[in-house]
Image: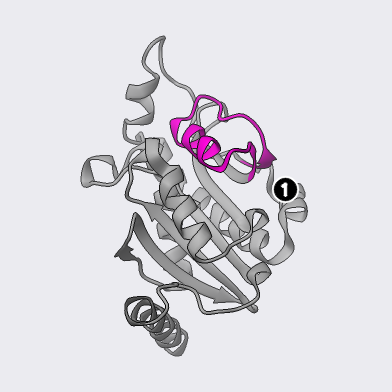
Amino acid sequence: MLLYFYQNANYNMCQFLKFLFGNNTFLEETDSMKKFLIVGLGNIGADYAETRHNIGFKILDGLAREKQFTFETLKLGDLGSFKIKGRNVLCLKPSTYMNRSGKALKYWMEKEKIPMENLLIVTDDINLGFGTLRLKTKGSDGGHNGLKDIQQTLQTTTYNRLRFGVGADFGKGRQIDYVLGEWNGDEIDTLPERIEKSTQLINSFVLSGVKITMNQFNGT
């Protein structure tokens, strides 16, 4: 375990130094079809850290713990990366705030030459019960401002997104307060298992593709 941690930490430091002093790409040069971009949506700052709207950040933090990599603050967001079976995976937590998520996504997608089919957005969804996972390849923004900006930036509604259900336990006109509110006690107790399931889904997406992953994880 210590050897794995050292090797992965060393890999991330090399990638960071390469970005600073090399060709300004974060991932090592490889076949573009082996490069993936996972974008967790959220808002920066301590005030938002434990809110429902920040589940995208929280899932990427869980992935970082599992894969033992760290995030570095670079242009338009915090970035980290890991390798798995020959695939290079870039993880991005945009620093643009939710409503401008598309700007950071497009910048890193183009800089790293990552194909659209290898992009995965991780976001909250009030239309799903708490903790329910649903992977989709296309669809509307569902009233989500982060997805709305991404669709406007990419000029398409066809892109992979992992929707993490946060429920809709709010009254009329209280949606914003709800998604920007913090998890309740029962949700806090269940979150670790749900985050672990989400990271399993991300691993499957990278290794097995979107169709197999949808069949295996949707609704779990």
| Disc 1, SS | helix
Residue 131 locus on image (x, y percent) = 53, 39
The answer to whether 208 appears left or right of 190 in the picture is right
Identified at 48% across, 23% down, the residue is: 168
Dot 1 alpha-carbon crowd within 10 angstroms: few under 14, some 14 to 19, many 20 or more: some
- Residue 157 in the magenta stretch? The answer is yes
Amino acid type, residue under disc 1 in the picture:
Met
Task: Answer above or below: position of 163 versus 129.
Answer: below
In this picture, which residue range is highlighted in magenta?
134-159
Task: Answer above or below: position of 23 versus 180.
Answer: below
Residue 161 locus on image (x, y percent) = 60, 44
Q: Tell me if residue 17 can be seen.
A: yes
The answer to whether 144 appears left or right of 75 in the picture is right
**The C terminus - image quarter:** top right
- Residue 173's quadrant in the figure? top left
From the image, tell me which residue sits under label 1.
214
Most foreground residue, 160 or 105: 105
Q: Tell me if residue 201 can be seen.
A: no
Most foreground residue, 98 or 214: 98
Task: Answer above or below: position of 56 versus 25.
Answer: above
- Residue 200's quadrant in the figure? bottom right
Identified at 52% across, 66% down, the residue is: 112
In the rendered image, the residue lying farthest to the top is 172
Residue 138 locus on image (x, y percent) = 68, 38
Most foreground residue, 49 or 36: 36
Residue 164 locus on image (x, y percent) = 53, 40
The answer to whether 175 appears left or right of 83 in the picture is left
Identified at 34% across, 54% down, the residue is: 76
- Residue 78's quadrant in the figure? bottom left
